[in-house]
Amino acid sequence: MALTILFNFYPKEIKWWGGNYVVPDKKNPGKFLVKTYKIQCVEKPDKTFCLHNGWTVARCHMLCMSQCNVEYRQNYDKLVSHEGECKMPIYGKR
């Protein structure tokens, strides 16, 4: 089980995704360690994916999250609906 806190920096040319995540401390049962992971993204344009929950995420964001949470790699097909942005619903219409 890992708690992931993500942040991103958007300079003009380089994108960074990163975050802190909490993992159990194997040397001290019942204690936790905070680890940090970050990734530099230089894709132009950044490839996006639509998740089944309706969120549009960047490929680099998915790669970063998968480093902190193995479930993103193991359940890719269950999480990703299709490549590209999600279609936004029209408000007021059902």
Image (tube, helix red, strand yellow):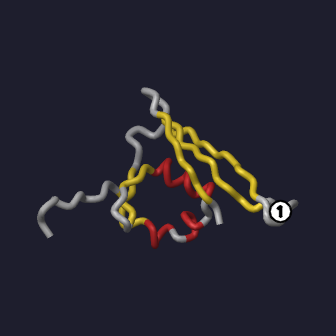
Report the number of discs: 1
Could you tell me which residue is drawn at 36 percent across and 55 percent down? Answer: 56
Residue at point 41%, 44% (across, down): 46
* 28 vs 79, nearest the viewer: 28
Quadrant containing the C terminus is: bottom left
Residue farthest along the top direction in this orientation: 12
**Quadrant location, the N terminus:** bottom right
Q: Amino acid at mark 1?
A: Lys
Q: Position of residue 74 (x, y in %)?
A: 57, 69
Horizontal arrangement in the rendering, residue 62 relative to residue 84 (left or right): right
Q: Describe residue 89's horizontal placement relative to residue 83 as left or right.
A: left
Give the residue at x 43% y 49%.
58
Q: Which residue is mark 1?
A: 26
* 86 relative to 40 in the view: left or right: left
Q: Position of residue 60 (x, y in %)?
A: 50, 48
Q: Which type of secondary structure does the marked residue at label 1 adopt? A: loop
Residue at image coords 60%, 61%: 69
Q: Position of residue 16 (x, y in %)?
A: 53, 38
